[in-house]
Amino acid sequence: MGRMSPTPSAVTTGSQFFHDVFNASPIGIVVEDLEGQPLFVNPAFCAFLGFSEEELHNKHCVDFSPAEDAAKDWALFQQLRAGSIDHYQLEKRYFRRDGSLVWGNLSISLLKNQAFPLVIAMVEDITAKKAAEEARFRHAAIVESSHDAIISKSLQGEVTSWNSGAERMFGYTEAEAPRAADHDSHPPGTPRRGERNSRKAWGWRAHRALRNQAPYENRASH
């Protein structure tokens, strides 16, 4: 510590134009000192977290997030203070005033050309993006763990996904599946890997039928 921190009145905020940009930005912006104390916060950041400007001025940057996320941020902040880096970026969670959690993409840069070095933090709300990613991962896990054969096809009829249930039923690996969709050299009704068991033979016939269906996610009972 031991550094002199500037007060908001001691910091030159620039022209009216930049002041207007700061206030009008749809992305949250925070100007901090080298101790991580907010000096200026824009309306977008206040709206993102649901706190007033005065409330945010009374917080420290590590107070915004759960301990695990705050620790990662603070470790990078220390590198910024030490001069090892002049910027960094990470995705982390933030506490809203009501106690709920939201996700933000944080970009931090060091501003050296001031009477006092400052840190500018820009935070983009990525909560919806994170929710969509989680839903995709959850769906993928359900599909992969299903005992049913679940197959997705493109508008052109090409197989785009092929779960382990489909592999067991049809006798194709996922890597082989796209080729199988357009493979016309096999005699109709012939299993791809021979007729070593009736399961694969039945699977090939079912697969031939699926080839002629409209694109959608097909299910075949195990």
Image (cartoon, rainbow, N blue to C red):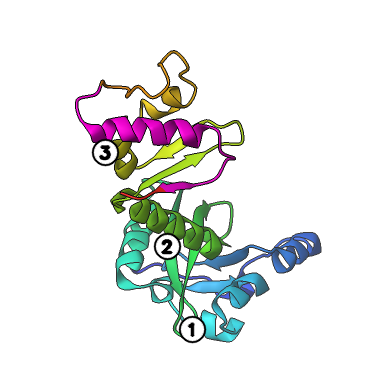
> Along the line of sight, which residue is nearer the eye, 6 or 189?
189
Picture quadrant where residue 205 is located: top left
Instruction: Kindly state the secondary structure of the residue where label 3 is placed.
Output: helix
Question: Is residue 197 highlighted in magenta?
Answer: yes
- Say which element carries label 2: strand
Q: Nearer the viewer, mark 1 or mark 3?
A: 3
Q: Mark 1 and mark 3: span between their CA atoms?
A: 60 Å
The local crowd at label 1, few if under 14, some if 14 to 19, many if 20 or more residues have their Cα within 10 Å, is few
Give the magenta part as a residue range: 195-219
Q: Which mark is residue 58?
A: 1
Q: Nearer the viewer, residue 122 or 135?
A: 135
Residue 107 placement, left or right of 214: left
Q: Position of residue 92 (x, y in %)?
A: 42, 62
**Separation of marks 3 and 2 at Cα, in angstroms:** 40 Å
Q: Which residue is mark 2?
A: 92
Residue carrying label 3:
168
Cα distance, mark 2 to mark 1?
A: 21 Å
Looking at the image, residue 216 sits to the left or right of residue 44; the answer is left
Q: Above or below — where is 37 with respect to 144?
A: below
Kindly identify the amino acid type of the residue bearing the numbered disc 3.
Answer: Arg
Q: Is residue 140 left or right of residue 105?
A: left
Q: Position of residue 138 (x, y in %)?
A: 38, 58
Which amino acid, by three-letter code, is at mark 1? Asn
